[in-house]
Amino acid sequence: MVFSYYHRLSPRQRKIYDRSNRIETLPLVPAAIHHEAVFALQNALLGESRPAVERTAQALADLLTEACQTPPVRVRVLDRRPSNAYGELHGLYEVKNTRTRPLITLWMRTVHRRQVVAFKTFLRTLLHEIVHHLDYEMLKLEDSLHTEGFYKRESSLLHQLVGDGEPGNQPTGSRRGAPRRVGAGPASGR
Ligand SMILES: [Zn+2]
């Protein structure tokens, strides 16, 4: 935990932070179909076909939201990552309003050399954005914060899906987008 960050939070936000931090796992019922979906996504990425990557990423997201009994989330896969001085954006979770499905956006190619993103990195980014979705829809947190508990939930999903294989490391300078709730109530300040 970043001490000064926590101390800047309002009492209401601290409650959300503490709750987010306490929950460390998202247990899935073991199912062969999850592993098949992961394998299909890996193959699609190897094949470098954007529509196939989008379709298989959506299929995996559907299985996970079904397993967690939450409303579905839409997954969109774009080609080349946007970047700025802080690094490359890997993924984004957006909620526009209560009528449309929340949207996860992922990018499948790096900025430099336009290489296809490593599979474990891509999978971890997808799971990261799904954990944002589950924070709101399953854990009913008012805000989805990057707490230690959040990253443990992300790792918990990853390990259940790929076993004890080493989780893909993020290259330095990379970042993921904080979740955005576009026009959904008062701004959370992020
Ligand atoms: Zn995030």
Image: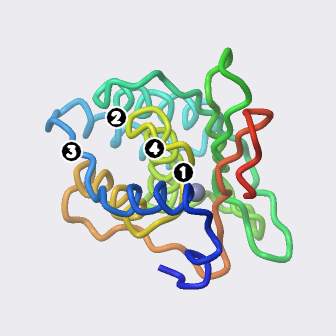
Q: Quadrant of residue 100?
A: top right
- Amino acid type, mark 2: Ala
Cβ of disc 1 within 8 Å of ligand 1?
Answer: yes
- Up-down relation of residue 15 to residue 187 (above or below): below
Residue located beneath label 3 in the image:
27
Which quadrant does ligand 1 occupy? bottom right
Identify the secondary structure beneath mark 1: loop
Q: Which residue is mark 2?
A: 37
**Mark 1 vs 4, N-terminal side:** 4
| Nearer to me, 87 or 8 | 8
Label 3: state its secondary structure.
loop
Q: CA gap, disc 4 to disc 2?
A: 22 Å
- The answer to whether marks 1 and 4 mark residues whose Cβ atoms lie closer than 8 Å is yes
Label 1 neighbour load within 10 Å: few <14, some 14-19, many 20+: many
Single out the residue that lies furthest toward the top.
Answer: 99
Q: Amino acid at mark 4?
A: Asp
Mark 3 vs ligand 1: CB under 8 Å?
no
Label for residue 144?
1
Proximity of marks 3 and 4: CB atoms separated by less than 8 Å? no
Q: Earlier in the sequence, mark 1 or mark 3?
A: 3
Using the numbered discs, state the Cα–Cα distance from disc 2 to disc 1 in whole angstroms.
26 Å
Residue at mark 4: 135
Q: At 65% across and 34% down in the image, what residue appears? A: 76
Residue 164 numbered tag: none
The disc, 2 or 1, on the residue closer to the chain's N-terminal end is 2
Q: Quadrant of residue 70?
A: top left
Instruction: Kindly report the distance in space between the C-alpha atoms of the residues bearing marks 3 and 2.
Output: 17 Å
